[in-house]
Image (cartoon, helix red, strand yellow):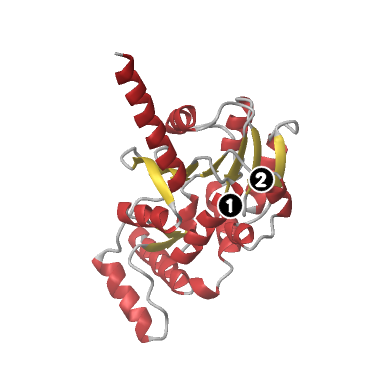
Amino acid sequence: MKTIVRLIKRCLEEIILALAPILPRWKLVDSSYIKLCGPPTLNMGLFAWEEEVIKKYFPPARARILVGACGAGRELLGLSSQGYFVAGFEPLDVSAECAKSAIPKENLLAFSNSTYEDLVCGKLKEIESFAPYDAVILGGGSISHLLENNMCKMLLEKVRKLCPDGPILLSWLKATYAGPKTKLFRKMLTKIGFKEAPDRDQYSFSMGFCHTFTRDEIFILAEWTKNSIVFYEDEKPYPQGYPHAVLLPQSQKLLNSVQAKSESYLIMKSY
């Protein structure tokens, strides 16, 4: 019986994925998240790998940090406790409500119950009013909820305008591929008029719509948006170990390289 229920669930997930272009994606994620995962909580703080990246690549406390798709506010609270000023936005209604109420007002610059698409379209005026930001976090694997590559590109371009010189900490879901049975079912759906989903796109009742990224895709995305990846990690275990990278503008990486070479030359000259 359990096998039949699991099979029906997977078939429904594939049908919903095939309908992705015409469905209200975030509303579906919002309702399914609450039913399956319960109310959002703030019981974790920053992950260890986030702490390491922030210590090494982010500016010191009192800098302005923008956090996209911030969930219930885990990153916002962790950053504000370290003395950062933060702004954030979150598409899921219940998570956004939790996040906004949890962050100390003296550290919260702005907050919006909004999506990445809203940011790209210029709808987050209050968030934008605090630019330029010193760093950005697009965390929790959240860019994987954008199924269109072009939207990922436009998002990074928009974020780079809001944070012209600082690091962007990006995380995503690691590439997983549809199995033979799933591919067969997708082919069957196309026979009755459904659009076939790309191989690494997924829908689940707990995670919503997702695109899982390969390493090459992330590097291409960085190149498209004139960013350089200065740190990359995809081996830490889920859930705390989302694959992640730190992006700097290509001009900033070049400047850092020139400065490093200059310092090395001066050291050599001192001998």
Which quadrant of the view contains residue 84? top right
- Please give the residue where the numbered disc 1 appears in the rendered image: 161
Q: Is residue 89 left or right of residue 136?
A: right
Nearest to the observer: residue 85 or residue 158: 158
Q: Residue at x 46, y 48 (%)?
A: 141
Nearest to the observer: residue 227 or residue 203: 227
Q: Residue at x 36, y 65 (%)?
A: 7
Q: Secondary structure at mark 2?
A: loop
Quarter that holds the N terminus = bottom left
| Disc on the earlier residue, 2 or 1 | 2
**Can residue 134 be seen?**
yes
Image: 102 above or below 39: above
Nearest to the observer: residue 245 or residue 39: 245
Q: Position of residue 138 (x, y in %)?
A: 52, 46
Q: Position of residue 251 (x, y in %)?
A: 45, 46
- Please give the residue where the numbered disc 2 appears in the rendered image: 131
Q: Residue furthest left?
A: 180
Q: Residue at x 39, y 35 (%)?
A: 258
Which quadrant of the view contains residue 176? bottom left
